Amino acid sequence: MDYEVFLLSRIREEHEISGDDTESVARGIAATGRVITSAALIMTVVFLSFVANPSPLVKMMGLGLATAIVLDATVVRMVLVPAAMALMGRATWWLPRRLDRRLPRIGVEGAAPRPEPVAAPAPGSN
């Protein structure tokens, strides 16, 4: 979960700065890739250290958790999520209007807050 929040926060920051969907995904991965990989490597080493325990249950848990961390960090966080975001384009940032109105309007550091939605003019009015 931490990897995902970290990755998506950075992609969102880049999107608010540039407005380009594909470029923001690429820049977000470039900025967070090393940190996510390092964190996953640390967790993998910690869980693999459980394999040295004489208990078969602890060994299986350690190996299973290490494998899960590696697959999650590499396949899901660094491949599937960014690929899906790049393919979805503008739809990645879509929110239902009711939810969009309820959420607070705050900006990321250095970026202006997102603009208020503009209501479409009534037909026939000028």
Image (cartoon, rainbow, N blue to C red):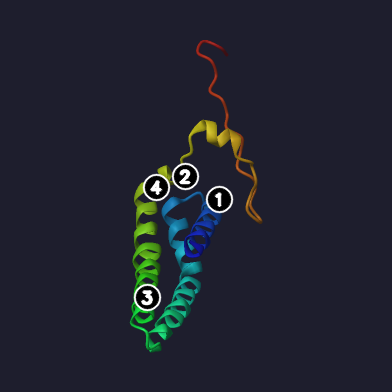
Task: Check disc 1 and report the residue beneath it.
Answer: 16
| Label 4 environment density (alpha carbons within 10 Å; few <14, some 14–19, many ≥20) | some
Task: Check disc 2 and report the residue beneath it.
Answer: 93
Q: Secondary structure at mark 2?
A: helix
Q: Is residue 83 above or below residue 63?
A: above
Task: Check disc 3 and report the residue beneath it.
Answer: 61
Residue at x 33%, y 78% (from the top left corner): 60
Do the residues bearing badges 4 and 2 touch, measured as CB atoms within 8 Å? no
Q: Secondary structure at mark 4?
A: helix
CA–CA distance between discs 4 and 1? 14 Å
Q: Secondary structure at mark 3?
A: helix
* Mark earlier in primary sequence (2, 1): 1
Task: Check disc 4 and report the residue beneath it.
Answer: 89
CA–CA distance between discs 1 and 3? 41 Å
Residue at x 53%, y 60% (from the top left corner): 10
CA–CA distance between discs 3 and 2? 37 Å
Question: Seen from this angle, which residue lies furthest top?
Answer: 124
User: Of the residues shown, which amino acid type is indicated by label 3?
Assistant: Met
Q: Which mark is residue 76?
A: none
* Mark earlier in primary sequence (3, 2): 3
Q: Is residue 44 above or below residue 7?
A: below
- Residue 27 vs residue 82: left or right? right
CA–CA distance between discs 2 and 1? 11 Å
CA–CA distance between discs 3 and 4? 39 Å
**Closer to the eye: label 3 or 2:** 3
1 or 60: nearer the eye? Answer: 60
Where is residue 59 shown, x and y percent of the image? 36, 82
